[in-house]
């Protein structure tokens, strides 16, 4: 921006605030005088309030386009919250409703969780089976533009609002991936996102796979039902709990999932400035998967509530944490409705693992680090074995056992394959004991 000589040299003139603003600012101020530089605990800083009124009035009089008072005040509230941390935000009516919909598991959009880092809009994780995941978006992809609008000029909530829309409508994103110099453009079609947070299957007889993509209100109940289905015919010999690319969600749901595997002890506790922000969650004795050998998969897209579960299971030595370091979001947000249908999303506390670890900006470090990859099976020619020799003795115990087919899920997911191998190894060691 070019500044003229007059702008630089002319002394600033103190302008008188509008009667509307004076009325808004005067009501909460205390009449008790304070010494210069000293502000009571419940007092507002008069000098900064006066400066705010001056800025407000200068914008009203001099901005190139006319702006109404309500818009200016709303923008001021947005700025006040966005400068606190990347997760606090002022929510207008549409944004507040959108957030409520997402926690209930259904909304319109592309199925992506985003955050900000260093002023850049960044993918935390794509949600399973959504346009975002099918288009190949990855954790830590930087979103440069949304339908041509640069994201560096948008708040987090404004970016989310832009990405949501009518099912079937196109959305164009320009992203920059780590390690690449040239941005890539991706066009997606919005869908009605019905987010089922729990999936399960048997990888092999006796070895279960439980995938939790995010933590919603019903996630603990759904996860418990999935464990019951997988152990219906026989007890599980091992379980892989997949929390990769899980952006978090409801704190109570995370505690409920951890409780499925723990029968005692602390799961998580929070600390904040207000009494009602200090909570703790402990395991109960009703534990459907108390003794099942457990491997928990995490990566850079595992955040918030996913880190609560991983941290609790790691601290209590209930399972082996495998994968790569998690995202490191250790703060708790409360959604506070306002009387006009709008709301606040405000960071009110930090959460801590049972051993008192704060994960904020640190993350969970896995017990066993396994990077993302794809398993390639070598084309090894079968050599001559005893069974091929003429006149070999038969095995009196019966026919030779044949190996099962290598599943496609394990073939395409090296981390999952290693988790299954570790579970088998743990069972071998346990039998020797």
Image: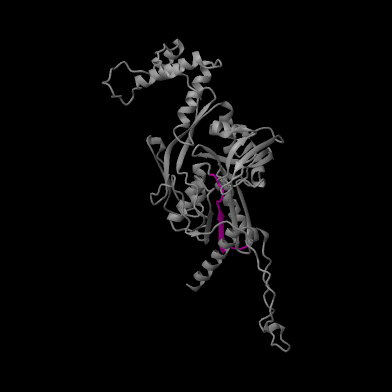
The relative height of residue 3 versus residue 423 in the rendered view (above or below) is: above
Q: Tell me if 58 is positioned left or right of 139 in this view.
A: left
Q: Is residue 87 visible?
A: yes
Name which residue lies at 52% across and 62% down. Answer: 293
The relative height of residue 84 versus residue 251 in the rendered view (above or below) is: above
**Front in this rendered view, residue 304 or 4:** 4
Q: Where is residue 262 in the image (x, y as percent from the top left)?
A: 47, 54
Secondary structure mostly seen in the magenta stretch: loop
Name which residue lies at 41% across and 52% down. Answer: 265
Q: Can residue 154 be seen in this view?
A: no
Q: Position of residue 191 (x, y in %)?
A: 68, 38
**Front in this rendered view, residue 54 or 412:** 54
Dividing the picture into quadrants, the one containing residue 386 is: bottom right
Q: Position of residue 317 (x, y in %)?
A: 44, 58
**Front in this rendered view, residue 40 or 382:** 382
* Outermost residue to the front: 5
Name which residue lies at 49% across and 27% down. Answer: 78
The relative height of residue 130 versus residue 346 in the rendered view (above or below) is: below
- Verify whether residue 60 appears in magenta: no
Which residues, given as a range, are shown in magenta? 233-247
Q: Tell me if 384 is positioned left or right of 275 in this view.
A: right
- Number of numbered discs visible in the structure rendering: 0
Q: Where is residue 411 in the image (x, y as percent from the top left)?
A: 65, 61
- Verify whether residue 245 appears in magenta: yes
């Amino acid at each position: 921006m070019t500044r003229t000589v007059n702008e630089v040299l002319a002394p600033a003139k103190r302008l008188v605030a509008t009667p509307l603003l004076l009325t808004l600012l005067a009501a909460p101020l205390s009449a008790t005088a304070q010494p210069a530089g000293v502000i009571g605990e419940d007092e507002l800083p008069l000098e900064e309030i006066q400066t705010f009124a001056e800025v407000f009035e200068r914008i009203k009089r001099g901005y190139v386009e006319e702006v109404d008072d309500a818009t200016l005040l709303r923008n001021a509230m947005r700025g006040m919250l966005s400068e606190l941390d990347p997760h606090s935000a002022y929510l207008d009516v549409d944004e507040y409703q959108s957030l409520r919909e997402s926690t209930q598991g259904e909304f319109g959009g592309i199925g992506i969780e985003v955050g900000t880092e260093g002023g850049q809009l960044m993918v935390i994780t794509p949600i399973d089976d959504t346009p975002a995941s099918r288009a190949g978006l990855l954790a830590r992809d930087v979103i440069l533009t949304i339908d041509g609008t640069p994201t560096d000029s948008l708040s987090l909530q404004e970016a989310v609002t832009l990405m949501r829309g009518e099912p079937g409508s196109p959305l164009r994103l320009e992203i920059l991936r780590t390690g690449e110099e040239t941005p890539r453009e991706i066009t997606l079609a919005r869908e009605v996102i019905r987010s089922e947070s729990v999936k399960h299957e048997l990888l092999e007889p006796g070895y279960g796979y439980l995938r939790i993509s995010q933590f919603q209100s019903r996630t603990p109940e759904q996860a418990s039902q999935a464990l019951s289905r997988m152990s219906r015919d026989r007890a599980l010999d091992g379980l892989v709990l997949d929390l990769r690319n899980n952006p978090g969600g409801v704190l109570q749901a995370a505690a409920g999932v951890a409780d499925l595997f723990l029968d005692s002890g602390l799961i998580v506790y929070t600390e904040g400035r207000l009494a009602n922000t200090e909570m703790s969650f402990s395991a109960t004795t009703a534990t459907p998967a108390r003794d099942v050998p457990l491997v928990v998969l995490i990566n850079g897209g595992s955040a918030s509530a996913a880190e609560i579960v991983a941290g609790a299971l790691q601290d209590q030595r209930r399972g082996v944490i495998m994968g790569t370091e998690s995202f490191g979001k250790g703060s708790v947000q409360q959604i506070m409705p306002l009387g006009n249908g709008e709301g606040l999303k405000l960071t009110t506390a930090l959460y801590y693992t049972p051993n008192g670890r704060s994960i904020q900006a640190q993350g969970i470090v896995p017990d066993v680090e396994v990077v993302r990859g794809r398993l390639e099976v070598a084309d090894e020619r079968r050599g001559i074995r005893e069974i091929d020799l003429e006149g070999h003795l038969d095995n009196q115990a019966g026919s030779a056992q044949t190996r099962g087919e290598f599943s496609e899920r394990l073939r395409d997911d090296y981390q999952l394959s290693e988790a299954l191998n570790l579970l088998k190894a743990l069972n071998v060691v346990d039998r020797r004991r």
